[in-house]
Amino acid sequence: MRLTLTSLQAEMRGSFAAMSLRIDNLDTNLHERADHILLSLDKHMKDTAYRFREVDRRFEAVDQRFEQIDRRFDAIDRRFDAIDQRFMIVDQNFKTVQEQFKQQTRDIIDALFPFFTSVEQILNKHENRITILEASSTRSK
């Protein structure tokens, strides 16, 4: 019985040693895997942070481009406003010149009207004389 008990003890010690070795191996594997996962997670976090910085940098570049475009549009808008002001001034000047032309035309017509009226009266008198002379010459024949 002693032999059996001793052999059982040895066998149990061997089993416990094997189990202890397996547990140690599992513990080591678990720690290695945990370390690997932590390293992967750390790398992933660093990569993600780098990518976010890159995205931020690109957004900043896009924002700067939009600001440049806004400045250009503002400049174009100011130019169009200045052009519009010039057109309003030209239009006002044209209206002024047009009114002056109308007034000068009226003044010329008013100045020439009496002359043409008198010329018309003279022509009418001459026409009447010619008609009278023609009538008298046809009677004398």
Image: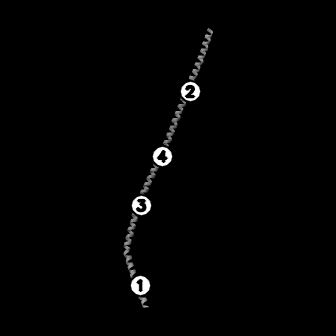
Label 4: which secondary element: helix
**In the displayed image of the protein, which residue is found farthest to the front?**
1
Residue type marked 2: Arg
- For marks 4 and 2, the one nearer the N-term is 2
Q: Is residue 22 left or right of residue 110?
A: right
Q: Which of marks 2 and 1 is in front?
A: 1
**Horizontal and vertical percent position of residue 30:** 56, 25
Q: In which quarter of the view is residue 110 placed?
A: bottom left
Q: Which residue is at 43% across, 58% downward?
A: 87
Rendered position, 4 above or below 93: above
Residue type marked 1: Thr
Label 3: which secondary element: helix
Rendered position, 98 above or below 141: above
Question: In the image shown, does 123 or 15 lie closer to the viewer?
Answer: 15
- For marks 3 and 1, the one nearer the N-term is 3
Q: Which residue is at 48% across, 46% downward?
A: 66
Q: How far apart are marks 1 and 4 (CA)?
A: 90 Å
Q: Are marks 3 and 1 in contact (CB under 8 Å)?
A: no
Q: Which of marks 3 and 1 is in front?
A: 1
**Horizontal and vertical percent position of residue 31:** 55, 25
The residue under label 3 is 91
Rendered position, 6 above or below 96: above
- For marks 1 and 4, the one nearer the N-term is 4
Q: Distance between the residues labelled 3 and 2?
A: 84 Å
- For marks 2 and 1, the one nearer the N-term is 2
Q: Which residue is at 56% across, 27% downward?
A: 33
Categorize mark 2 by other alpha carbons within 10 Å: few (<14), some (14-19), many (20+): few
- For marks 3 and 2, the one nearer the N-term is 2
**Horizontal and vertical percent position of residue 127:** 41, 82
The residue under label 4 is 66
